[in-house]
Image (cartoon, grey):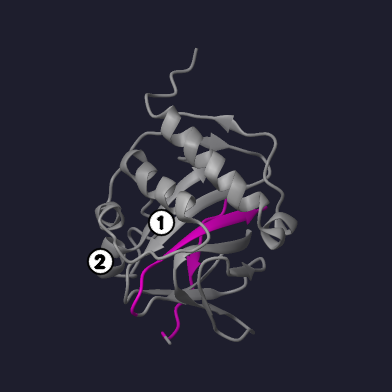
Amino acid sequence: MLDLGADRILWDGLLQEVRIAHEGHAELSLFCPFPDDLRPQRVLPFQVPPAALLANEQGLFSDLYVQTRNAFVAAGAVAQWRETYKDTDIGSDFMDRFGCYCLIGDGGAFTSATMAAWVVYMPAGLYYTWHQHPAEEMYLTLAGEATFMRAGCEDAVLRAGGTSQHASNQPHAMQTHAHPVMAYVVWRNGFDSPPVLTGGERV
């Protein structure tokens, strides 16, 4: 029998909160229904500097997704945090402050053939440069706020409940200002191709 580790209660609780948030948001549910083929898998924890920043973050205000936010923070202690842009020229400041870990997909506590899902955390005053990927994507802002940028679209400041949808290979970027942000990120299709930096100026 597969040993799924001692943290399943934590992961199962997070999954329940994420399901409630996902299925309760009409736009996100239309973009990608919450998967019915989820299978648990073992997480090999890996910590990075942003994990500690999230654990101590006090600025993630939210009036809609308090339980989801708290569950993502709690699971961060046992998550496999990603270093998506390691060995690129994005810079050490970004790598030390940009946080991301998977819930559904590679390195996450669950897997699905129809959807991948992450949490993204950015502290105040961080720019996530222009990037793109084959997967279609939707961000659901859970807490805090950020400016979301998409090629061909007006910039938008999003807070809890706001979404930003990205077509396949549509360049997009993010900027936090006075506040941090936490977002639930969903991919459909193109799971096997990582993001590619395209560069560009910050707002």
Q: In the rendered image, which residue does mark 1 sit on?
A: 84
Total numbered circles? 2
Amino acid of disc 1: Thr
The percent coordinates of residue 9 (x first, y second) are: 44, 29
Q: State the predominant SS element of the stretch in magenta.
A: loop
- Magenta includes 46? no
Asked if residue 176 is positioned above or below residue 73 in the image, the reply reads below
Asked if residue 19 is positioned above or below residue 85 in the image, the reply reads above
Label 2 to label 1, Cα distance in Å?
A: 13 Å
Q: Is residue 172 left or right of residue 146?
A: right
Kindly indicate the quadrant of the structure image that contains residue 143. Answer: bottom left
Residue located 55% across and 84% down the image: 155
Q: Which residues are magenta?
A: 178-202
Q: In the rendered image, which residue does mark 2 sit on?
A: 92
Assess whether mark 1 and mark 2 are in contact (beta carbons under 8 angstroms).
no
Q: Quadrant of the C terminus?
A: bottom left
Residue located 63% across and 38% down the image: 112
| Label 1: how many Cα within 10 Å (few below 14, some 14–19, many 20+) | some
Residue located 50% across and 33% down the image: 12
